[in-house]
Amino acid sequence: MNTNEPTNSQSGSRCLRIPLCWALLIAFDVSLMALTYAQEGNTGTADPPVQSVQTEIPGPDDVAADVRRFEAIDVFVDSGNQRLAAWQLEVKSTANDVQIVGIEGGEHPAFAEPPYYDKRAMNNNRVIIAAFSTGDNLPSGRSRVARIHVQVRGSGARTWLSELTTSATTDGSRIPAEISIAKTDR
């Protein structure tokens, strides 16, 4: 036996040493993650849920299948007694024979300008629109926030899915609101 070699009680095992700076860094990261997790706990105020609505918009029955017609759909957001400062929603047709061709603003001065939207995405039967206002004159209750112009091929009713993904008041906090759509009465 060679006495100059170090002896190891467990033959074939290696001792793994982590530098002290690495150990401190790992401990710091774990502590930071625990602190972040604890702060993200339930604060007692939950965000309002996303609201989805399915609406059937009637259409004429005496139109040939290859005839194109134009309609306008009004989009309403009801914020109850809270002032509505911002909103985002999605509107889409369940039928493929519908094309969104234009978007107007709402009836209240705060949302009279057309909402923001992706023009390339509007070429289909679906659009996501959003608007915000930093002014003092804001609507509360039910207000028309947009008008969507569509081209429809053929006769009959079309089913629309609308989803209010967010609504907020003047301080930026989310508020519960309801979405509804209806064919424009012109």
Image (cartoon, rainbow, N blue to C red):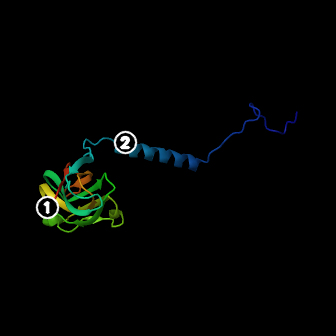
Image location of residue 177, percent across then percent down:
19, 50
Q: Which image quadrant: the C terminus?
A: bottom left
Residue occupying the point 42% across, 42% down: 34
Task: Specify whether residue 148 is in view.
Answer: no
Q: Nearer the viewer, residue 150 or 5?
A: 150
Q: Nearer the viewer, residue 164 or 48?
A: 164
Q: Secondary structure at mark 2?
A: helix
Q: Are marks 1 and 2 in contact (CB under 8 Å)?
A: no
Asked which quadrant contains residue 5, the reply is top right
Residue occupying the point 76% across, 34% down: 8
Residue at the farthest right position? 1
Residue wearing tag 1: 138
Q: In whole angstroms, how far apart are the C-alphas of marks 1 and 2?
A: 37 Å
Please, what is the three-letter code of the amino acid marked with disc 2? Answer: Ala
Image location of residue 159, percent across then percent down:
26, 50
Q: Is residue 29 above or below residue 185?
A: above
Please, what is the three-letter code of the amino acid marked with disc 1? Answer: Leu
Disc with the residue nearer the chain's start (1 vs 2): 2
